[in-house]
Image: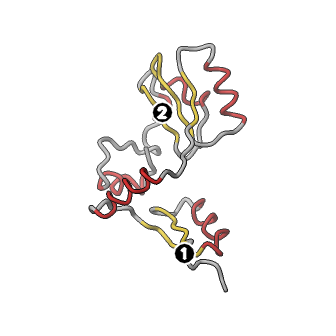
Amino acid sequence: MCSTKDVERVKALGADAVIDRKKSNLLDAESAYDVIFDTPAVHSFGRCAKGLRPGGTYVTTLPDAALVTGMVRALFTSKRCRFVQVASKRADLELVGGWLRDGLAVPIDSRYKVADLGAAIQRQADRRRVGRVVVEVAEGWPS
C-alpha cells in the first residue's frame, strides 16, 4: 500500500500487488488479511483489526502506548498484535550486501553526513520524499 505518486515506482520494484491508499482503504476490508505489517507505524491494532482474518497478526515497528493497548485488546480476540525490532547482525548485513552487489536496486532520495542528522530526519519525515534517506557515517563528522 502506498500513495498515488508511488504506485508505478513500487510496481517497478517488483511488488506482487500495489494498493493506492488514496483510492482504496485497505483497512476497511473485512477479514481480508493474514498479516498487516505496518512498517511506518502509522496505524494501530485497533484500526487494523477489522481487516485481519481470525488468527491474523498486526505487526508494527514502533513500541508505544497504542501497541500496549493493542496487545491487551488482542488477548480477547483470535487476532494477534506484535512488535518487531531490527538488530544489526553481521550475517544479515552480509546477506543484504550480497543482494546489493548482485544488483538489488534501492532508490535513494538523498544523502546526509552524520553531522547533519537533524536535516536527514526532517527529510525522512517529508511526504514528498521518494526513496531512502542515507546517513553517511564514515568521515561524516567535522574535524
Q: Is residue 30 left or right of residue 139?
A: left
Image location (x, y in percent) of residue 68: 69, 30
Name the quadrant of the C terminus. bottom right
Q: Which residue is pictured at 29% across the width and 55% down the height?
A: 12
CA distance separating discs 1 and 2: 36 Å
User: Which mark is on residue 24?
Assistant: none
Q: Which residue is mark 1?
A: 138
Would you call the spot at circle 1 few (<14 residues within 10 Å), some (14-19), or many (20 or more)?
A: few
Would you call the spot at circle 2 few (<14 residues within 10 Å), some (14-19), or many (20 or more)?
A: many
The amino acid type of the residue labelled 1 equals Ala
Q: Choose top left, top right, bottom left or bottom right for residue 94.
A: bottom left
Q: Is residue 82 left or right of residue 90?
A: right
Q: Which residue is mark 2?
A: 36
Q: Choose top left, top right, bottom left or bottom right for residue 104.
A: bottom left
Q: Which residue is pictured at 47% across the width and 45% down the height?
A: 22
Q: Secondary structure at mark 2?
A: strand
Instruction: Report the residue that reaches farthest toward the right.
Output: 65
The amino acid type of the residue labelled 2 equals Ile
Looking at the picture, does residue 60 appear above or below residue 140?
Answer: above
